[in-house]
Every structure is written in structure tokens, then in C-alpha cells.
Image: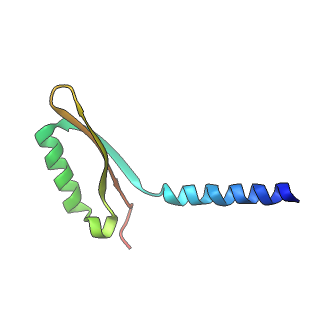
Amino acid sequence: MWRRARRSEGRRRAGRRERASSVRRETFALPRDAARAKARELFARFPKAAYMTEIESSRELPGDRIEFTMRRLPSAD
């Protein structure tokens, strides 16, 4: 009986992960100025207040390029 309880707990956790991963992520690697323009474009298209848009991670690549990942909800409520 204890094993069943543990399995259902694991399923509940898996369900939470699925719901939590219902965000959209897009990764871009662009020259610095183009990266800034792309980020501004995405924030204008998907406002932070409605879509919870944010830059999840970023790093500088060789050749003055920026790689960044934008995270947002797939739709506004």
C-alpha cells in the first residue's frame, strides 16, 4: 500500500512539471545590436505583464555576438 502512495506522489510531481514547462522558450544568437533589437521586439509583441516575458539566460559569444533565451507564456489569459 505504501508503494502505491509513493507512485501516485511521483505522478503528481510529474504533472506539476508538465504544467510548469508550459512556457515557450526561444534561443537566439545574434550580433549585439540585432540581439537588443530582437529582445525589444519580443517584449513589445509579448508584454511582460500579460505573457510573463523575460530573458531567461544570456551569454556573450566570440565575435561580439549575444546568445539569449526568451521565456514567455504561450498565451495571455
Q: Residue 62's x, y, as percent?
A: 20, 25
Image point 21% across, 37% down: which residue? 66
Q: Give the farthest residue toward the bottom.
A: 77
The correct choice, above or below, for 5 with respect to 36 in the image is below
Image point 83% across, 54% down: which residue? 3
Image point 28% across, 69% down: which residue? 49
Q: Residue 37's x, y, as percent?
A: 14, 48
Image point 23% across, 55% down: which residue? 42
Query: Considering the image in quadrants, where does the N terminus appear?
Result: bottom right
Q: Residue 74's x, y, as percent?
A: 39, 61
Q: Is residue 3 left or right of residue 51?
A: right
The correct choice, above or below, for 60 with respect to 54 in the image is above
Q: How many marks?
A: 0
Query: Considering the image in quadrants, where does the C terminus appear?
Result: bottom left
Q: Is residue 19 left or right of residue 50?
A: right
Q: Give the farthest residue toward the left.
A: 33
The correct choice, above or below, for 40 with respect to 35 in the image is below
Q: Which quarter of the figure has residue 8?
A: bottom right
